Amino acid sequence: MSLQIIDASVVYPGLRGRPPTEALHSVNLTVETGEFVVVLGASGCGKSTLLNLVAGFISPSSGSVLLDGQPVQGPGADRSVVFQKHALLPWLTVRDNVAFGLSLQGRPRTERYSISHRFIELLGLSGFEDAPVYTLSGGMQQRVGIARALTCDPKLLLLDEPLGALDALTRERAQELILRVWDRSGKSVLLITHSVEEALFMGTRLIVMSPRPGRITHTFDLSFSRMFLAGQTARAVKASADFIALREQVLQIIFADEEDAA
Amino acid sequence: MSGHPVAGTASPAVRRRGLIARLARARATKPGEIYGVPGAGDTRLLSIATICVLVFVWWLVTAMGWVKPLFVPSPQAIVGSFVSILQNGYTGEPLWVHVGISTARVFGAFLLACLVGIPLGLAMGISPIARGIFDPPIEFYRPIPPLAYLPLMIIWFGIGETSKVLLIFLSVFAPVALGARSGVRSAAIEQIHAAYSFGATRWQVLVRVILPAAMPEILTAMRIGIGFGWTTLVAAEMVAATSGIGYMVLSASQFLQTSVVIMGIIVIAAIAYMFDLLMRLLERRLVPWKGRM
Ligand SMILES: Nc1ncnc2c1ncn2[C@@H]1O[C@H](COP(=O)(O)OP(=O)(O)OP(=O)(O)O)[C@@H](O)[C@H]1O
Ligand SMILES: [Mg+2]
């Protein structure tokens, strides 16, 4: 599924006399089928807004958002979202949360459970199938959210800081898992993260955003995930000279932005 | 205060600050507890002690003859009238008939109010049209005491069961509907968005996300609502009733049978309390996640 954002701006109205916020200013972005685009930027620069725009939860104040050439009218099952926070359903068990999308789509119970079983296992949640989600740790809840989005086999996967609450080891595992799923399925992915290393490792393209107003300032083409999928270990990729050089370059851009803003 | 175990050399000011600090700080946790949960701790013993003290003071006041039995009969007299009415009935009807008919009135009205009020409240929560239409009438009648519109009920619906049940219904309906309405806002927008991004229809979002998320508030509203129902019972049974606990209390008061009045009040309180326990149990079963996410 290809995504085209053309000259899109988003303005949040100011409440109670405060000035309106221009969360996105004239953003242009194209994501072709099978691309993995990572968005990086300081807190408050409009990353979640961009993702909500693509998901169809908000509409642009100007410009347009096209999916396969058709304007986005609202959310749909072709795009699954992993949210930054608070999106699991506490009245359901882990299994039913993971199977939630499938059950909305009316799939029979046995099929639902066998599909969700696979993703529960993939994300290392085996043994917690019947636990209520509110008894899980923050990182486990994030993994339930990822599993839930993957079960529905969306054409475009939208991930808003999905790995933020994971420890270093689980985080690397989850990165590798998402890369493998992406590689095998040919999905398009839009991933938001705060981690420069994660961004460089996972994306085929990196987009750096700046705040006030939120806009895209830099774009990099990346090939590190290809190196990983071709057989190199994740650590070897992340320790390579190219990787480190680019990481420093991107960090400098972000720090310069922060100083401008301050 | 003087027996407070503080280091002997501390000045009174320091000691006082120590006490205040101790009260202001949450207790340290025991294993299996979580620090700082508001109101954590068992209250059963304290509650039983309070009841015992109250009954003892009551007994003392009557046994010492400080007030006339006409005003405050002794606890024994209450038990006596309970036993006698249990054996002989009141105005020709056995006690369980009075209890049964009152319970039926309150529960009938309560069920009806839930059946109408919860869907209507949810509709008001999700649709500005429903809110625009139903908000004014509900907000208009809600603060009026049921006794004030009781005469209207009688004029419109006569002195049969209809006006009794309707009066109780109205007192339960408003809190239940308003609870369901505000419960709609309990669902996080991310939860709703998640459902939509899996292709959910509006109806599915309502049934699978908004309704369960609103459950805690709906149950609380039901608890409050049934409480209002019991408060209105006596008013409802003022209308040409010939049976019911409220009727028993009213007619006993006309014959200055104070012990029957108090006994009736205690019976009403006991039934209402048992139902409240049931609702709390239901709450623990249905929404164990309340306030946890
Ligand atoms: N619903 C809203 N109403 C008004 N302003 C909003 C709203 N949502 C976001 N904003 C503003 O838009 C800007 C961008 O917000 P956004 O949530 O997209 O940032 P973000 O890049 O995702 O940040 P973070 O990395 O902290 O999640 C912020 O300045 C924020 O205050
Ligand atoms: Mg965000």
Image (tube, coloured by chain):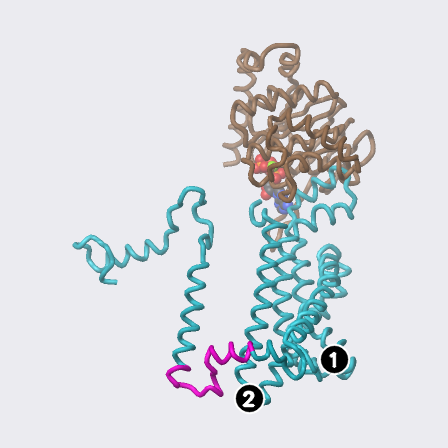
Instruction: Answer yes or no: is residue A187 visible.
Output: yes
Classify B231 as above or below A110.
below
Q: Give the position of the N terminus of chain A as an image quadrant.
A: top right
Corner quadrant of residue A199 = top right
Give how far across and how far down residue B47 sits, in percent.
45, 63
Callout 2: residue from which chain?
B
> Which color is chain A depicted in?
brown
Q: Using residue A233 as the reference point, say whether residue B169 is left or right of it.
A: right
When the figure is inspected, residue B90 is found, relative to residue B172, above or below; the finding is: below
Q: Residue A195 location in percent, x, y?
A: 55, 26
**The residue under label 2 is which amino acid type?**
Leu
Assess mark 2: CB under 8 A from ligand 1?
Answer: no
Which SS class for mark 1? helix
* Residue A60 in view, yes or no: no
**Residue A124's x, y, as percent?**
60, 26
Read off the residue under disc 1. Answer: B153
Residue A244 position, x and y percent, is: 53, 15
Q: Is residue B91 magenta?
A: no
Query: Element at badge 2?
Result: loop
Please check the rendered image and state whether residue B75 is part of the magenta-colored stretch, yes or no.
Answer: yes
Q: Earlier in the sequence, mark 1 or mark 2?
A: 1
Please name the residue shown 74% across and 82% down the image: B152
Residue numbers of the magenta segment: B62-83
Label 1 marks a residue whose chain is B
Q: Residue at x 64, y 40 (%)?
A: A87
Q: Which chain is cyan?
A: B
Q: Residues within 10 Å of mark 2 (few under 14, many from 20)?
A: few
Q: Which mark is residue B256?
A: 2
